[in-house]
Image (tube, helix red, strand yellow):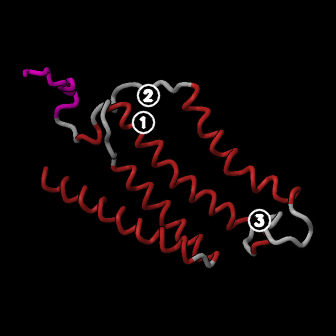
Amino acid sequence: MNAKVHRPATVATRDAGRPATLRGYAGRAPALRAPALLAPALLAAALLAPALLAPAVLEAGTPGPAADPRDSGLSTAWLVFGFAAQGVFGLRFLLQWIASERAKESVVPRGFWVLSLVGGVALFFYFLRRGDPVGMAGQIFGVLVYSRNLYLLEQKNRRSR
């Protein structure tokens, strides 16, 4: 039985000599649809709702999250640092999504690994300051993986020169 095999379109001539991670970058940004824009807002609301509602629900003296994050012993500067680190770490997914949409295939650009490394190191120091061994362990393993992937990409680029 002869079934037709779907073959993706070949990359345009302008992209022929470019690495796979950069193909398709000359095109326009992908069109975002309303559900794609709404999903992060709904996720943020779901994650923040318990923290926002906790002070009103918990009785005085009941164990639970601190009403004010600064009561955890962290200064406002450290909280801002932690949110910024998480923001950098989260941007990697947006970068990878846009790169894949432009290339019309799943790609992992070098910037994904750079943002992962920078965000992971920053989060490691944030968790270190908090004294959170679970967070530190999670980030240190990731940092090793991100570093290794950047090293492998650099080796590949050197061989292709």
How far apart in space, not on screen, are marks 2 and 1 (Cα)? 7 Å
> Residue beneath label 1, please?
98
* Up/down of 96 relative to 72, above or below: above
Q: Does the magenta stretch include residue 144?
A: no
How far apart in space, not on screen, are marks 2 and 3 (Cα)? 38 Å
At label 1, which amino acid type do we have? Ile
- Earlier in the chain: of badge 2 and badge 1, it is 2
Q: Is mark 2 on a helix, strand or loop?
A: loop
Front residue of 50/157: it is: 50
> Residue beneath label 3, please?
69
Q: What stretch is highlighted in magenta?
A: 1-16
* Up/down of 17 relative to 49, above or below: above
Looking at the rendered image, the disc whose residue lies closer to the viewer, 2 or 3, is 3
At label 3, which amino acid type do we have? Pro
Residue 91 percent across, percent down from the top left: 50, 48
- Earlier in the chain: of badge 2 and badge 3, it is 2
Tag 2 near tag 1, CB within 8 Å: yes
Q: Does the magenta stretch include residue 9?
A: yes
Residue 29 percent across, percent down from the top left: 44, 28
Q: What element carries label 3?
A: helix
Q: In which quarter of the image is residue 22?
A: top left
Pointer 1: residues within 10 angstroms few (<14), some, or many (20+)? some
> Residue beneath label 2, please?
29
- Earlier in the chain: of badge 3 and badge 1, it is 3
How far apart in space, not on screen, are marks 3 and 1 (Cα)? 34 Å
Whether residue 20 is visible, yes or no, is: yes
Q: Quadrant of residue 40?
A: top right
Pointer 2: residues within 10 angstroms few (<14), some, or many (20+)? few
